[in-house]
Amino acid sequence: MPKTVITPPGSGIPLAPFSPGTLADGIVYVSGTLPFDKQNNVVHIGDAAAQTRHVLETIKSVIETAGGTLDDVTFNSIFITDWSNYAAVNQVYAEYFPGDKPARYCIQCGLVKPDALIEIASIAHLAQ
């Protein structure tokens, strides 16, 4: 089964050796996505809602580049640095997934850059 690397136009260079996404057999795997600009600087420092919106827009661009939409997302892995941001994350998350919600989990952990408050990785199954 061949895979296709998915890199949206205008993407920055990844901080580590990975692709923004891969497509294989109609499934898009979106790498863990942090609130980074094209130079891998954290954006919206201290604002969990704005960082969540930035992350979900980035994920949306990967999935759309692969030919899908956020409606195709079946699973999200969410990593937050502090449970006090959970409500803000969920409020923005619900805007991006207004209908049937994907399965997900959310854990509290440290992230690669201290100013990053959230990271999300996604799996989407494209309609065939």
Image (spheres, rainbow, N blue to C red):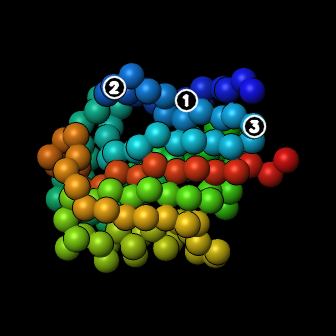
Q: Nearer the viewer, mark 3 or mark 2?
A: 3
Q: Mark 2 points at which residue?
A: 16
Q: Residue 17 carries which label?
A: none
Neighbour tally class for label 3: few under 14, some 14-19, many 20 plus, Cα within 10 Å:
few
Q: Position of residue 79 (x, y in %)?
A: 32, 56
Q: Nearer the viewer, mark 3 or mark 1?
A: 3
Q: Mark 1 points at which residue?
A: 7
Sequence-earlier tag: 2 or 1: 1
Give the residue drawn at x 59%, y 33%: 22
Q: Which of marks 2 and 1 is in front?
A: 2
What amino acid type is highlighted by mark number 1? Thr
Q: Vertically, is 86 above or below 52? A: below
SS class of the residue under badge 3?
A: loop
Q: Position of residue 101 (x, y in %)?
A: 59, 72
Q: Vertically, is 52 above or below 67? A: below
Work out how far the residue at label 2 is from the one at label 1, CA to CA, in angstroms.
14 Å
SS class of the residue under badge 2?
A: loop
Sequence-earlier tag: 3 or 2: 2
Q: Vertically, is 74 above or below 18? A: below
Give the residue drawn at x 39%, y 73%: 90
Sequence-earlier tag: 3 or 1: 1
* The N terminus - image quarter: top right
